[in-house]
Amino acid sequence: MPKKKNTNIVWLKRDLRLTDHLPLHHAIQEQENFLILYIYEPSLMRDVHYDERHWRFIEQSLADIQEELQVYDKKLTVAHGEVAGVFKLLLDKYCIKNIFSHEETGLKITYSRDNQLNLLFKKYNITWNEYPSNAVIRGLTNRKNWEKHWNNVMRDPIERINLLKAKIINHDFCTKNLPTFPIKKSYQKGGFKSAHIELKSFFIDRGSEYSKNISKPEKSRYSCSRLSPYISYGNISIREIYKVLLNSWDKPGWRRSIKAFSSRLHWHCHFIQKFESEITIENEPVNSGYKNFPYLIIDKSHSNFQLWAQGKTGYPLVDASMRALQSTGYLNFRMRAMLVSFACHYYLIHWKLVAEYLATLFLDFEPGIHYPQIQMQAGVTGINTIRIYNPMKQALEHDVDALFIKKWVEELRGYDPGYILNLPSKNYDLFSQPESHYPQPLYNFQERIKKTKDLLWQWKKSNKVKKNNLKILSKHVKV
């Protein structure tokens, strides 16, 4: 039997780039042959949180990496199969000494996978070198000095990746099994090239009115950075973005927008740190006092869940937001919060159902941000202000000309903005017009929300919820 060749592996997950990449940098420093490996995992692709839009974005991201490596006459290795099985196949051919990867703050399914891999790697005496992602600290029990740590990481120099010196080899898996996804131009294109184009255009002109338009569903599509999916899949690091931000800090007329954008970069890591420190948030409320909160809808087949999911609630801004999300994968933060609030507070849909469905729609689905935010907007943390979004009020404040609504709700395009924005009230009779197929709301909003608000406050004041608040504050609040 021929002797196996020594080989290291850089395992890509949510870090699909070739810059500011410590696993890749250290693999090159070892001066040993190594594979750059990405694995399409069937179990993850079937998971309820994922949709074709995510895997298309990943496919495009890998294509960018492949194209860049070809410049240096090198290749990316791509496999399709469960991770443990793929590594076993590689172990049949290579003597693997080191695995280099970023730590992943993912779902329970990836956490369990990594535990399984730890056992496999120990069995074969493989050293797994894991590196922090975007200043998130593994095993953190409190937030003492966390903010200082974040600032230090973001100001650290970026190690240059010298691909000329990289001893990258390729293992040809059977490519006929690799998934492919049809291009859809309504979604942002994945890859580090697109990420840097968006970053550049944001700081040239798009971001000048960031703070002014961040809450507006239509204008935010231009004025917001649109970097979130690129951050989620690691096409660009937070540090790379932050360094560009610092270089733009004194740009005339930009101070409010720069400060607002800077705070969002802090929040990104803050929320992922929450999830990293308490992964049970995926399935249980962070405050266990809400475990038995009396939601009316706990099944996705319920007709009210379907009305919300299909954008047929009778509330124009809610329906426009849902349809825009379905078609493009993007929605600004305030409208996302409104969708969660409407589902959990108007229909009393369980937050877990809301989280799973919206994950399939958000192109930038990031578990570590997704679950803490969903629970906060649903009002089941115990430590946050109870926020209930009124979609009529939001429309009057942020889509007063109904431009966003008309764009996405075809049934309403022929009507005046004032008429559209007041549709859910009793004084309008569009619902009785046979030529309109737009639905009528099932419930009076104010009456329905009053009952939910009373219920939320009743639970927030309960001893079970209060008992957990101090523990949550000590573990998750920034110091």
Image: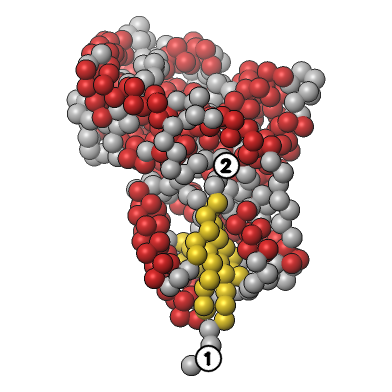
Q: Which residue shows up at 30% across the image and 32% down it?
A: 285
Q: Which residue shows up at 26% across the image and 21% down it?
A: 467
Q: Is residue 244 above or below residue 403?
A: below
Pointers 1 and 2 in contact (CB under 8 A)?
Answer: no
Q: Is residue 408 visible?
A: no
Quadrant in the rendering for residue 230: top right
> In the rendered structure, which amino acid carries the disc numbered 2?
Asn
Q: Is residue 66 left or right of residue 454?
A: right
Q: Position of residue 130 (x, y in %)?
A: 52, 55
Indicate the colouring scheme.
secondary structure
> Disc 2 marks which residue?
134
Q: Residue furthest top?
A: 427
Neighbour tally class for label 2: few under 14, some 14-19, many 20 plus, Cα within 10 Å = many
Q: Is residue 303 above or below residue 317?
A: below
The answer for how far apart the CA atoms under marks 1 and 2 are is 42 Å
Dot 2 falls on a residue whose secondary structure is loop
Please name whichever residue, 334 or 316, is drawn nearer the observer in this view of the structure: 334
Please name whichever residue, 321 or 226, is drawn nearer the observer in this view of the structure: 226
Q: Which residue shows up at 61% across the image and 70% down it?
A: 34
Dot 1 falls on a residue whose secondary structure is loop
Q: Position of residue 474 (x, y in %)?
A: 40, 26
> What label sits on residue 2 in the rendered view?
1
Q: Is residue 307 above or below residue 164?
A: above
> In the rendered structure, which amino acid carries the disc numbered 1?
Pro
Neighbour tally class for label 1: few under 14, some 14-19, many 20 plus, Cα within 10 Å = few
> What label sits on residue 33 in the rendered view?
none
Please name whichever residue, 293 or 121, is drawn nearer the observer in this view of the structure: 121
Q: Is residue 176 above or below residue 319?
A: below
